[in-house]
Image (cartoon, rainbow, N blue to C red):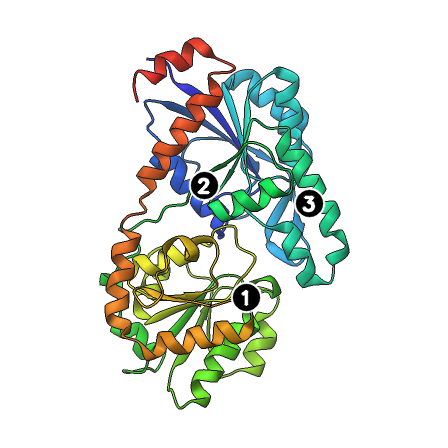
Amino acid sequence: MAQIRISIVTETYVPDVNGVANSLRQLLSALNPAQFCIQIIRTAPRSDWLPETEEVWCRGLTIPMYPDLQLGLPARRRVARAWQSFQPDLVYIATEGPLGNSALRQARKQGIPVISAFHTNFHRYSSYYGLGWIKTLTLAWLRRFHNRTAATLVPAGEIANALSSEGFRNVSVLPHGVDCQLFHPRRRSSALRQQWQVGSEPVLLYVGRIAAEKNIPLAISSWQALRAKGSNARLVMVGDGPMRAELEREYPQIIFAGVQTGETLARYFASADAFIFPSQTETFGLVTLEAMASGLPVVAFNMAAAQMHVQPGVNGELAADDTDEAFIAATSRLIDGDLHAMGIAARLQAECASWQSVAEHFTALALRHASSGVPNKAEQIQTMV
């Protein structure tokens, strides 16, 4: 039986620690190897990494204000050589940087079908760094990039509607999933809570970049509002970023745990009591599902993953609008509720979002778009689904 040969092009992949890299690896791991032969074209990893499939490494530059990420440099010749031997039936461009643009141009030249992903709201990020004036230019560039592909995959219907209203064509929803075996309430650790020096008091957890676009000051303000009302809630922040050092100096009562991964990260999730996520720049926010799978109720704005999975008063709370005041009020409602019961409901909700179901959805999309370039092979593979 023939396989679809799919080339994945991305500026970030494991061992990078971010939502795009992690979700892409989960998706590829869940694909049926009998149906797909996978090649990954990526920026060269900057720490030890043993590839799990064929990888072609390209040069990259550190992104200003994001030292843990790289921007892939143009590599059209490198891409062409890689495809000369691999002969892809379909190209999936996961990031829209110079490396992705090189791949798009080469694929169009060779007549290879291309689908793309929209993972990060770069045009929204700009306003958090005093660069709001480039928002229109960035959005125009992203629209031109994605409209030259056969389909743009986004993780939530809200994002699909927003992009469609901005002139993006052929937008399809491919939701993210969660590893419910790794992220599980059974990983709760009394030793870790002792390390935090907490007993029965509730622990609010944030996981993500400690950066302006994540709206970190609002997480701190919400925690402070609880303390002002007499709550003994603690705040633990997992992650790193440009704001961390200053915030550690300013708020010694907050536990800054740095970057955590794998089973250690899963223990941090499960050992807290609620998850606080004030970001308004997410296209999805995978950490929301990871928290829910770990048995944590979530407080967030009514968007992205939270809009899809959080039921107010059942497994978390949503801000009534996009103001700081509404988010602080939602945090207060969460802490005043039954955290244990909401945590159980959160876990049940997360169990409905498996990576296997996401992989099946991706397979259907890949079959449809690869068929435009390889009709005979697609017809053969269709019989396997």
Question: In which quarter of the view is residue 379 placed?
Answer: top left
Depth check: give the residue in front, 237 or 302: 302
**First reached walking from the N terminus: tag 3 or tag 1:** 3
Q: Name the residue type under label 3.
A: Leu
Location of the N terminus (image quadrant): top left
Measured from the top left, where is residue 327 in percent x and y? 49, 72
**First reached walking from the N terminus: tag 3 or tag 2:** 2
Mark 1 crowdedness (10 Å alpha carbons): few <14, some 14-19, many ≥20: some
Residue at left offset 34%, top offset 32%: 360
Residue 380 visible in this rendered orientation of the protein: yes
Question: In which quarter of the view is residue 213 placed?
Answer: bottom right
Measured from the top left, where is residue 249 in percent x and y? 57, 81
Query: For the residue labelled by badge 3, is the local secondary structure a helix, a strand or a loop?
Result: helix
State the residue position of label 3: 139
State the mark number for residue 322: 1
State the residue position of label 2: 24
Query: For the residue labelled by badge 1, is the local secondary structure a helix, a strand or a loop?
Result: loop
Measured from the top left, where is residue 163 in percent x and y? 59, 43
